Amino acid sequence: MAEAIVGPLVGKLQELAVSEAKALVAVNDDIRGLRDRLMWMQAFLRHADPRRRDTSDELIRVWLKQTRDVAFDAEDAIDDYTLKVDLSRDDAQPSPIKREHLGKRLEEALFHDFEKKNRFVICVRGEGGVGKATLVRELYERPTTMSKFDFQAWVSFAPYLRSSSILQLIHQELEETNTWCPRSDIDEKLKKILSKNKYLLVLDGEVSNTDWNAILAVLPDDDANHGSRIVRIMQGAHKWPHGIAPQHRIELQCFDQTETASLFKQRVCMEEKTEGKINTIENFDDDLHGITKGLPLAIVLMSGLMQTKEYPTEWQAVFHYLKPKKSKRLDSILAMCFDDLPHDLKSCFLYFAALPMNTPVEARKLVCMWMAEGFLRPKDGKTMEKVGRIYLQELIARHLVKFVNMDNVNSGDESVAVHHKVHKFLQHEAQEASFVDIHNGDDIPSLATTRRLSLQNYTDKYAALANSLPKLRSILSNFQEEVNDDEEDEDYDESEGDEEDEDYDESEGDEEDEGDRDSEKEDLEEEDSDLEGEKEVEADRDEEKEIDEEDNDNKDNVLDAENESSEEVERDEISEEDVQNERSEEIKQPNATPLSGFLHCWEPLSGVLHCSREHGSPQESIKSYIKEMFQVSKFLRVINLQGIEIGENLPTTIGNVVHLQYLGVTACSLKYVPSTIGNLKNLQTLDVRDTYVDKLPEEFWNITTLRHVFGDGLFLPKQVGDLKHLQTLESIDPDENNGWDSKTFDKMVHLQSLHVWDSSHNGFNAEAISTVIEKANFLEYLDTLTLDVDNIPLSVFTSPSLRRLHSLKLDGKLLDLSVMKSEQKESKFCFPNLNLLSLRNTEVTQDFINKLGKLPLLDSLILDTNSYKDDQGLLIFSAGLFKSLTKLTLSELEDVIKLKIEKSALPELIDLELVWYHEDIKIEVHGEHEFVKKIQEENDDLYGRITKVLVAPKKIAQLPSMKHRMTSGNTKVN
């Protein structure tokens, strides 16, 4: 994977050469020469890189390693040069094969004696990639299932999180929030939510027996919870938990030969050409089953690989390569899929190794990080963001990456993930190529040459970090643990042997060589596999006292903080206010300590992670560490810190990392961002969601390279700089003192996503929004608009400036509806391209619904709480309207007691979802509709409320029959 380093470097040199040409700098020829040499090197690597897998070719391996080192040195030289010379200028998936027998067993276990049975657990077990989550999710998402439970939550988590963190995730899903609840309150909050209610929880992730018992102890189980269910998805090598009835144990096996071929053909989108390619391979079904062993994940990966092959000879070559592989078959398939990727996509795909296992990532956030890393360049007139989305779609089409929560695919908030088997493969590849250094709770200091550092606190230990990382380009964290909780440390003293080594080296065929994790076992059994010497590693969970002793023994392994880089980083001016903020925080926390030592992390009552070195106050130590990182790691391009408590103030030294393009500090108590952030002339993305930041310094709004700004009610001043590259602005509050005018947004000519939020609920936003929308022809590129305010002007629907809008979400009362009714011609809706519309608290009328029905491309409509108002409780979808609508969701419209769908209304509707509807609701459907058949299959209760009204066919004038004419003629004769 040396090309993953050289590829982005060539692009960086190309960009640098163009910038140099503009600046008329004398070294332009040297830069172009280095770029040309690297391009030749890149071409050779594309040919040589796949051969490195041949372990006998040691020459290739050595050459690739040396090439990678040279590329690193070149990148260091380029970044060091640009640091000193500022060159910045204005610059769906097909449905799976159904396992009907297992599906019925799961459904019977879930609903049998529903009203009588107490809460119980259902376990679904099978080896990795066999389709456990797919089977459960199919039933979980059915409207029938949703209608039977008061609360539902699906929680996926990294291997062996502590019970407290898993309970936090459950709470977040139930409350639909990312806010962390204090540890001392989480048990009571969950009991308060779930008590006296039926709930369905799905837990997808590896968990120790001790943690499992702790989770069950918190979730309520009494007479009021009759019918509640917990579904646990577990790996096949693990023993069934104690107390699980045989009828509640569901085990999945791999597919047989017929099912294997069927799934492959379904996934590869069979056409006549594809059939022809299959026919060129003798014993295709046998060979396919032999290669994949019937493992659904392997079959899907094979289908993604083969559908990129155009000629029959290419199909034959793939089968010829994979057939001889007797062990690690899944690894061989993954390696071939990876090597087959276009060179531009390899770095993007490999980046998933730096993200937590079994944890979805927001798609647009991922693209922003790819962009900051230098993986994306404008191409064929497309922006970097557009190129990134195309790359992501390509990875999804190849079945290497999957969408999570497909229902939200049109909303802009979709998330993506990779299977944990794919994640292990990527981590192996990334570590071999020195692409990223991953710390998941171990105590090995990072090397001074680390370029990307991923902190993944899977185990409940401290993270040991070297103090000086001068080569660091990216740092990513995903802390969600409580490590210094005395109460839990006592609980975990007995859980030795509950963790597994998450090494990539597993033999396929026995993909899940994971030892049984009984909490009573003291030693983990060693498993023999095709990989010689592979062992399961026992992970000790000692008490804090024992950890401290271990720290003392390992201090010699940590780099001394005084061994700093001899090059002094040039500092920009720091405002007196910023200095005062830092000093005030230092006064609050006077116990500063040397930076040498280990970094301890834990989650106190505030619900976010705090870190500390030995003998120091937690906040001061982590603040000092982050402060020094900003000074020493001068090449940083990506900072994505989630859940690290750095205090209320972001260090002023943030202004020193002038290469920075992505800054994300989320899920912590951050309040203030210093004015030195204005020094980041290359910053493209800022993400401060789930923090207390509500105002950014004026200097920030003058950074001309800004492309994406994410926050929670950020104050947007009336006067901002030249933000012509800005595409995303979420979410913002208007300037209450001065308001907004057309000049506020007139330079944001490429703005595509805007979210306005009225945090003070004073109604001030309506006037500001009206001013902008009615005069803002410059918003013509706006694709997504979200208004979460008390009052929303009707001009949102009538202004021609929003004609390119695809997604519109409104939460607030819609004003001037009476004007619309009296002046229908003047209030024509100008949404020729709108696909998704979500309404909440709008109180719209039947006349408004009728107007919406004329929108030509409206595909999905969501009517949420208080979105519709009718005195008679009647909602009508009239004939001839909503001709493109495929999905209709009615949620918590408790005043609606009759829903009427007239003839020829909603002709394309496939999904009709009713959530929390009136107990006496009646649905009157005229004519035949496809969605009725789907409701009949999935929701008996809702189907029982439907009254079908048959529509008689139109009478066609006919000539009298021959018999009638003869009879009539005879009568006349007589």
Image: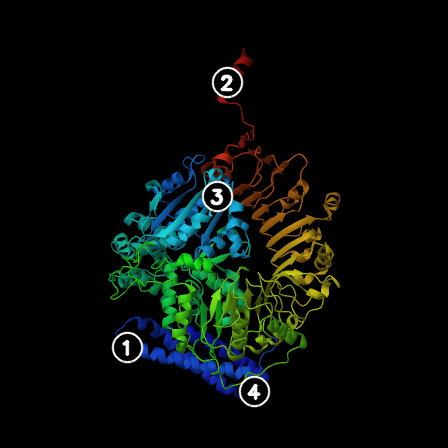
In this rendering, would 639 be left or right of 428? right
Residue in view at x 53 percent, y 46 percent: 193
Q: What residue does disc 1 label?
A: 58
Q: Nearer the viewer, mark 2 or mark 1?
A: 1
Q: Nearer the viewer, mark 4 or mark 1?
A: 1
Residue 108 image offset from top left, x and y in percent: 39, 38
Q: How many marks?
A: 4
Looking at the picture, which amino acid does disc 1 mark? Answer: Glu
Q: What residue does disc 4 label?
A: 25
Quadrant of the rendering where the N terminus is positioned = bottom left
Q: Nearer the viewer, mark 2 or mark 3?
A: 3
Q: Of label 4 and label 2, which has the lower sequence position?
A: 4
Helix, strand or loop at label 2? It is helix
Residue in view at x 57 percent, y 32 percent: 920
Looking at the picture, which amino acid does disc 3 mark? Answer: Tyr
In this rendering, would 900 be left or right of 125? right
Q: What residue does disc 2 label?
A: 966
Looking at the picture, which amino acid does disc 2 mark? Answer: Met
Helix, strand or loop at label 3? It is strand
Q: What residue does disc 3 label?
A: 199
Q: Residues within 10 Å of mark 1 (few under 14, many from 20)?
A: few
In the depicted structure, whether residue 795 falls above or below residue 504: above
